[in-house]
């Protein structure tokens, strides 16, 4: 609900600030007073596009703000239009995009003008309008349908993806086999190139390595295996001597243990050196073999632009692709069956939803015919045409379109073929009145939807608006006294000219002000006693009718 509207320096409006009631708000004024400017300003703050021509002459910016509540929460939306061309929108003080504003407001405020009835004129929306009538009967089944639709699409996509993969993979099958066989023939293992490179370095430096390792080994064990002069022999004697006296002192026992540990550690080193000496026994042929093997591996790394681990992983990937190709028939059968099962479930649910929708449509047809009769569509016919589509969508397989005949003898025609703005407005009003609380919009703004009607029909439109206002806030810009008389809160827009500049103002009318305003709509003057009495009589009639 909108509680307050503030407009500064917008077109003919220098400053407007006024509060709105929670029920039926009616705004009237002479032609050119600024009623359409007010609605345009509200449309812009709710997300419509704006341009710099809307900034009041002489001002550097225009400012529009609406404050109210949505679902019980306070809401403030503002729009600032700079003369330089920029525009700034804010939602509760935070800068937002126009798209975000429109998304936020789409279920909060709905503006309807004489030709601004896109939801009803667009056949794509007819299915949603129908489903909102007695939505409690179809909402749960629609939710199930949409879940099934999503599951079917997912299963079908998985099957289609497999078919595309099969076509591509089959073309590549020979290539995959060749590549797998080539890599398999390499017989690679992880880190092999590093091992070979280290071994080749050992081979190329074998003489220097042998001399150093041999010298180290002799130092530990003694040259020509003369253990008496070796480091290990000496350390062995130390260990033996300390062991004999270790029982006399904890400190000696500790040192004896350390000497023993050192002896065995050096013994391990000596054994390792012996292994290295044994491995240094190779020929020139051995060196050539290692070099050739390393060259083969380096060629493979250049070919695949991968290291050894990457090549091994690529081989595993090739094996997986080859396995998939060999098992395509089984996998296709499994996925096809899954998609077919989901399709059958979806078709059954779509048929169930369609049955419910036909029942709802029949009831909506009856309700609309009654409403159209009230709105002075003499002998009118209304039909909801439901056709079965070739395929199922998220809302089933139904295509829904509203058909109407507003004159006796004329055939039913698509609602979109209705040319009269007044007829469109009344039809839209009938929908709004029927759907009532099913529509979640909290505030509806009607901008002179009464064009083309008068007399008793105007009274019926006013009563319908008043009835809708029992469930939500209504703001109606009108020039008809029959509609204005139903207003819970009435406002008068006026325009004055000072120093060659236009100024628009708005005022909330008290009881007497409402009478004078309606008298002016009747006769063009608020001084006629006949017009004033007619206004009072009309207000009394509308008050009794609205009870």
Image (cartoon, rainbow, N blue to C red):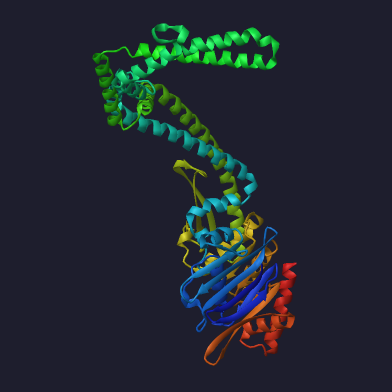
The answer, for residue 377, to whether it is visible in the render is no
Residue nearest the viewer, comparing 224 with 192: 224
Q: Quadrant of residue 79?
A: bottom right
Q: Is residue 244 left or right of residue 540?
A: left
Q: Is residue 340 left or right of residue 504?
A: left
Quadrant showing the N terminus: bottom right
Q: Is residue 88 left or right of residue 222?
A: right
Residue nearest the viewer, comparing 285 with 335: 285
The answer, for residue 282, to whether it is visible in the render is yes
Q: Is residue 408 above or below residue 271?
A: below
Give how far across and how far down residue 357 sits, in percent. Answer: 57, 45
Quadrant showing the C terminus: bottom right
Q: Is residue 491 above or below residue 111?
A: below
Query: What residue lies at 31% left-to-right and 27% top-to-bottom?
Result: 170
Residue nearest the viewer, comparing 376 with 508: 508
Give how far across and how far down residue 530 sits, in percent. Answer: 69, 87
Give how far across and how far down residue 397 sits, in percent. Answer: 49, 42
Q: Is residue 33 above or below residue 425?
A: below
Q: Quadrant of residue 352?
A: top right
């Amino acid at each position: 609900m909108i509680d307050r509207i503030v407009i500064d320096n917008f077109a003919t409006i220098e400053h407007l600030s006024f509060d709105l009631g929670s029920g039926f708000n009616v705004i009237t004024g002479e032609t050119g007073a600024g009623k359409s400017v007010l609605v345009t300003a509200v449309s812009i703050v709710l997300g419509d596009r704006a341009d710099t021509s809307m900034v009041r002459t002489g001002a550097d910016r225009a400012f529009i703000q609406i404050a109210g509540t949505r679902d019980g929460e306070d809401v403030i939306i503002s729009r600032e239009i700079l003369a330089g061309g920029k525009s700034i929108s804010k939602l509760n003080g935070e800068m937002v995009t126009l798209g975000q504003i429109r998304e936020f407001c789409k279920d909060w405020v709905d503006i309807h003008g004489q030709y601004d009835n896109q939801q009803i004129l667009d056949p794509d929306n007819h299915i949603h309008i129908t489903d909102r009538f007695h939505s409690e009967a179809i909402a749960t089944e629609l939710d199930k349908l949409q879940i099934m639709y999503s599951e079917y699409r997912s299963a079908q996509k998985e099957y289609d993806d497999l078919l595309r993969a099969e076509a591509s993979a089959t073309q590549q099958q020979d290539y995959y086999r060749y590549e797998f066989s080539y890599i398999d023939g390499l017989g690679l293992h992880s880190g092999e190139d590093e091992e070979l490179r280290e071994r080749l370095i050992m081979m190329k430096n074998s003489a220097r390595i042998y001399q150093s390792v041999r010298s180290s080994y002799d130092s530990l064990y003694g040259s020509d295996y003369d253990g008496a002069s070796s480091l290990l022999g000496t350390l062995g004697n130390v260990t033996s001597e300390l062991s004999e006296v270790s029982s006399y002192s904890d400190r000696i026992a500790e040192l004896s243990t350390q000497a023993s540990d050192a002896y065995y550690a050096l013994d391990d080193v000596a054994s390792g050196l012996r292994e290295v000496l044994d491995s240094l026994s190779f020929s020139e042929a051995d060196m050539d073999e290692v070099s050739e093997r390393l060259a083969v591996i380096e060629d493979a790394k250049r070919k695949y632009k991968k290291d050894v681990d990457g090549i091994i992983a690529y081989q595993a990937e090739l094996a997986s692709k080859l396995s998939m190709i060999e098992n395509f028939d089984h996998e296709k059968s499994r996925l096809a069956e899954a998609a077919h099962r989901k399709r059958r479930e979806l078709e059954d649910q779509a048929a169930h939803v369609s049955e419910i929708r036909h029942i709802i449509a029949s009831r909506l047809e009856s309700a609309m015919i009654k409403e159209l009769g009230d709105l002075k569509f003499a002998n009118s016919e209304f039909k909801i045409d439901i056709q079965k589509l070739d395929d199922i969508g998220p809302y089933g397989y139904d295509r829904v379109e509203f058909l109407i005949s507003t004159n006796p003898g004329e055939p039913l025609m698509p609602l979109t073929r209705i040319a009269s703005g007044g007829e469109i407005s009344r039809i839209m009003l009938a929908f709004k009145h029927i759907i009532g609380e099913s529509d979640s919009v909290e505030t509806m703004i009607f901008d002179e939807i009464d064009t083309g009607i008068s007399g008793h029909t105007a009274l019926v439109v006013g009563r319908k608006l008043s009835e809708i206002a029992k469930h939500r806030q209504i703001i109606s810009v009108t020039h008809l006294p029959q509609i204005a008389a139903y207003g819970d809160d009435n406002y008068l827009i006026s325009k004055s000219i000072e120093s060659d500049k236009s100024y628009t103002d708005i005022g909330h009318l008290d009881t007497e002000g409402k009478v004078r305003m309606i008298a002016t709509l009747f006769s063009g003057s608020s001084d006629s006693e006949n017009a004033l009495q007619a206004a009072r009589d009309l207000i009394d009639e509308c008050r009794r009718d609205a009870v």
